Amino acid sequence: METAITEHIADLERRVAALEARLEPENPQPTALALIDALKANTDLVDGAVTFGGVVDTGGRHYEYEWTRPTHWVTDSEWEEEISRLSALANPLRGEIMRRLLTSPATVTELVEEHIASSPGTAYHHLSALQAAGWVTKHDGSFAIPPARVVPLMAIITACEAH
């Protein structure tokens, strides 16, 4: 009886190990601490730095982006342009438009047909604000997020998570 229980426990341990192995990625991603360690190792940064970046596949496109600013640049610079750019996103409908545009460019008609905007006038109003702030561009009647804005947008949304 004791042998049967021991064998049963050993079998369960093998099965749990196999399940856990499936959950672990084959190529684990570096932790955020790797980024912190890299910033600490940069002797050119007198007062530290803020950095963000990402490797993103969305809407059938691949984006790689990284941006760093030394601490003094952030604390000593005027924030007027950045706050203006950020405020353009601070609207639920604009957020939905941006989330939709991550998948592919869209026309005003498509945004209305997909029930994202209630009318062409509403869509144009919000797209104009996003375009003025540099979050979207227009080409051949379609609006899209410029490649250099995809990762920053996702970083902003991620930074706004409760953590």
Image: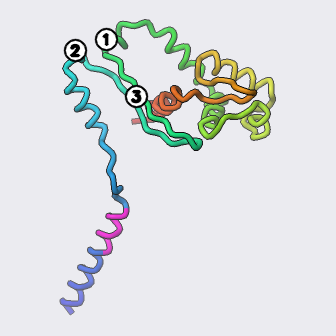
Check disc 3 and report its element: helix, strand or loop: strand
Q: Is residue 135 above or below residue 35?
A: above
- Mark sitting on residue 72: 1
Name the residue furthest front.
Answer: 140
Q: Is residue 20 left or right of residue 59?
A: left
Amino acid type, callout 3: Glu
* Quadrant of the image occupied by residue 159: top left
Q: Amino acid at mark 2?
A: Val
The crowd level at tag 3 (other Cα within 10 Å; few <14, some 14-19, many 20+) is few
Query: Magenta region: which residues?
Result: 15-22
Q: Which residue is mark 2?
A: 46
Q: Position of residue 7 (x, y in %)?
A: 23, 85
Tell me which numbered mark, 2 or 3, is placed earlier along the sequence: 2
Q: Amino acid at mark 1?
A: His
* Residue shown at 75% from the left, 23% from the top: 124
Q: Quadrant of residue 3?
A: bottom left
Task: Say whether marks 1 and 2 touch (CB < 8 Å).
Answer: yes
Front residue of 55/46: it is 55
Gap between marks 2 and 3, in whole Å? 20 Å
Q: Residue at x 79, y 33 (%)?
A: 109
State which mark lies toward you, 2 or 3.
3
Which residue occupies 39% across, 36% down? 163
The colour style of the image is: rainbow
* Residue 18 located within the stretch drawn in magenta: yes
Where is residue 1 shown, x and y percent of the image? 21, 93
Q: Could you say which disc has been placed on residue 66 in the image?
A: 3
Give the mark nearer the N terminus: 1 vs 2: 2
Tell whether 64 sits left or right of 69: right
